[in-house]
Image (cartoon, rainbow, N blue to C red):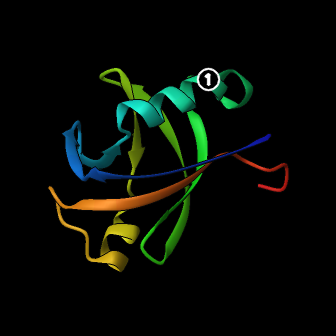
Amino acid sequence: METGLEIEFSGELVEWRGPAPYYFVPLPPDEADLVDEVKAEVAYWGVVPVRARIGGTDFTTSMFPREETWFLPVKAAVRRAEGIELGEVVGVRLRVGQSSGD
């Protein structure tokens, strides 16, 4: 299901260590609140599917709640394609939800 909600923001690429390092851009509070307003329509298993764009790279992933916001995972292929380093602030465009064809 697609909500039509589109969000643009800038955020810092952070690392969260688990069994392997993962990289995320946390949403700023105002943008996280927008996602909270529509999460009941699109969430499954506690995550929110999104289409994202950083620079010239589009990708799909699922955001999850953490530390009172939503964390957008940034895949290694996206980081390589855009030359993004840990701690760098990046511009992000999101479309929340997925269309039925995904």
Question: Percent position (x, y) of residue 39?
Answer: 63, 26
Nearer to the camera, 54 or 19: 54
Q: In this rendering, does residue 95 appear at all? A: yes
Count of numbered circles in the view? 1
Q: Which image quadrant: the C terminus?
A: bottom right
**Residue depicted at x 72% and y 47%:** 98
Report which residue position mark 1 lands on: 37
Nearer to the camera, 45 or 90: 90
**Residue depicted at x 30% and y 22%:** 67
Name the quadrant containing residue 54: bottom left
Q: In this rendering, does residue 45 appear at all? A: no
Q: Which image quadrant: the N terminus?
A: top right
Question: Percent position (x, y) of residue 56?
Answer: 47, 78
Above or below, 61 relative to 77 = above
Q: Amino acid at mark 1?
A: Glu
- Element type at mark 1: helix
Relative horizontal placement of residue 11, taking residue 53 as reference (left or right): left
Relative horizontal placement of residue 23, taking residue 60 as reference (left or right): left
**Residue depicted at x 70% and y 31%:** 42
